[in-house]
Image (cartoon, rainbow, N blue to C red):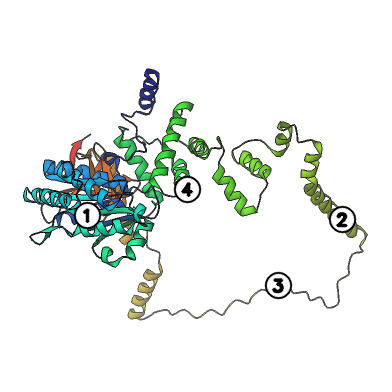
Amino acid sequence: MQNMQAINEEYLRYWGLEHHPFLLAPDGHMMCVTGQYFECYERLKYAITTNKGGVLIASEDAGLGKTTMLLKLIEDMTADYGNNFRYAYIDHPTVTSDQMLAQITGMISGLKPSENKLENLAILKNALIAGKMEGGRNIIVIDEGQMLCEARSVLQELRALINLTHNGEYLHTFILSGQKALWDTLQEMPEFWQRLPVRYYFTPLRFEETRELIRYRLNKAGLDVAREIFLEDAIEMIHKYSKGLPRTIIAVADLALLNGYNDKTRKISFKEVSKAIGSMSGRGESMPYVVSEKKEETGESSPRAAEIFSSVRNGGFTPLEYTSRNPGRNFFDTVQFMKPVIAILLIITFIFIGAIGYRMVSPPKDPQPSTVIIKEVANPEPAKKPAVENPPAQNAEEAGKTEQSSAQPPLDSGPQKDVIDSFREEAKKRRESNRYAEVTVDAANVRSAPDLESARILTIVRGEKLPIIGEKSDADGMKWYKVNLYGSRTGWIASIVASANNK
C-alpha cells in the first residue's frame, strides 16, 4: 500500500499536479461549467430561485455529465444557504412508490421515516414548510430516471409530489434527470410533461469543448496555466474516439497521462493516446477503431488483412516481415501476395515493347495535300490620331482627373495607410504591454465586448494571466480589461473577477 502511494505521489509530481485530474467518479468541484453546461446550470438556478416547480434534464447518451452537474448544483446551493438548504438525492430509483416517498422524507426531514405513507407525507410537508419559512431552498432530485420508464406508477407518484404547495407557492423544486428514453416517455404523459416547464437536453461535446474540458481539469488539478501537456493531434484523437462523451474523454486522457509517465515523455501525443485506446479496447497498443474504419472502406473481412493494416498504420512491419514472423506463412504465401503486382508489371512491359517496335517499322508519313500552313502576319500599326496642340482648359482638367483616377494609389497613403498604421499600432501595444490581468475567482468568463450581456468566448480559472492591451468602462462604471487570448484573438474580462498587475 505504501509503495502504491509513493508511485501515485511520484506520478502527480512528474506532471506538476496536486491531485488527479481525470478521476471517473462524479465530482462537482471538477465540473467545467462552460457552453451547454453553463446554460443548464443557469436554468437550474433560475428554476430554484423563481419556484418553477419542476425541471427535466436529459441527454442523448450516458456519460454526458448530468450527475456531475447535479452534484455541482447541490455543492453550490449548500455553500450559499448552509443549513437552510435541504435536499433529497435519489440515484437508484428502482423502488416502489412507498419506498421512494420514505427515502425522500428521511433525507429532507432528517428523521426516520414512518412505515405509513400518509404519515411520511405529513412529515415531508412540515419539513419543507419549515425550510421555506427560514428563507432557505428545498430540492428533490431523482437521477437515472430512465430506469422508471416502465414504472408508470412511480412516475405518477412523483408527479403528485410536485403539487406540494403552501400559500400559493411550490414548497420545493423537483428535478428529474435521465437519458433520452426518459424524455420520450414523459412526452407520452402530458400531465407530467406540463409540470416540468424548465427542460434541458445534453448533446455530445464539440472538439473545442473537448479541448477546454481537458485543459480545465488539468488546471484545477494544479497544472501551471502557462503549460500545455496534450498536443493538438492527441486531443483530436481523443475527441474522435470518445465521440464527444465526457466520461470517455476523461478515461482516455487519464490512461494517456499514465502512458506518458511510464515512457517519461513531457508531452502527450498521438502515440500515448493510441496506447490508451488500445488498452481500453482490450487489444494492446493497436488502434482498433482505425482498423474497423479501414474494413468499412475496403470491405475487408480477413483478420490477417486487419492485422497487417494495423501494424503498417502504426509504423510496424511489412507483409514480407509478417511472413517471416509467422512460421505458418511460407514462400508460397509471399508468391500468392505478389501475383497481381507481377501480372501488372508484365502487361506494362509488353505494351511498352510493342509501342517501340511499331514506331521503328512504320515509314514516315508525307504531309497530306489537305494540310493548311498558317503564316504569322504582323498586324498593321493603327493610324495615329493627330495631336491637338492647344487643348481647351476644361479638357486638360478632365485629362488630369482621368490620369489621377487610373493610377494605383500607393500603399502608404489614403485608407490603406490607416489600416496598416492601425495594425502596427495594435501589434506594438501587445509587444510593449507590461500589464496582465490575473483571475481572482475560481472561474471567470472572457467576453466578446465589455458588457455582461455580450457573448462568452471562453472560461479561465483562478491564477491564469492574460496580457492587457486596453481598458474601458461600461455604462454602469465597471472597468473592463481588453486582453490578448491567442494569436490575434482578443476578449474582455471584468475587473470584478480579475486584477491588473505589472509584470
Q: Secondary structure at mark 3?
A: loop
Q: Residue furthest front?
A: 116
Which circle's residue, 4 or 3, is located before the other in the chain? 4
Q: Secondary structure at mark 4?
A: helix
Q: CA distance from mark 2 to mark 4?
A: 53 Å
Looking at this view, is 358 or 253 the one in front? 253
**Residue 185 shows up from this direction:** yes
- Disc number at residue 240? 4
- Does residue 496 appear to the left or right of 98 in the view shown? left
Mark 1 is surrounded, within 10 Å at the Cα level, by few (under 14), some (14 to 19) or many (20 or more) other residues, namely many
Q: What residue sits 13% from the left and 58% below the top?
A: 165
Which label sits in the foreground, 2 or 4? 4
Q: Is residue 489 above or below residue 410?
A: above
- The residue tagged 1 is 174
Q: Position of residue 112 (x, y in %)?
A: 17, 41
Amino acid type, callout 1 = Phe
Q: Is residue 446 above or below residue 371?
A: above
- The residue tagged 3 is 376
CB under 8 Å between discs 3 and 1: no
**Residue 452 shows up from this direction:** no
CB under 8 Å between discs 1 and 4: no
Which circle's residue, 1 or 4, is located before the other in the chain? 1
Which label sits in the foreground, 2 or 1? 1
- The residue tagged 2 is 356
Amino acid type, callout 2 = Ile
**Total numbered labels placed on residues in the image:** 4
Which label sits in the foreground, 2 or 3? 2
Q: Position of residue 402 (x, y in %)?
A: 38, 73
Which circle's residue, 3 or 1, is located before the other in the chain? 1
Mark 4 is surrounded, within 10 Å at the Cα level, by few (under 14), some (14 to 19) or many (20 or more) other residues, namely some
Looking at this view, is 30 or 351 the one in front? 30
Q: Secondary structure at mark 1?
A: strand
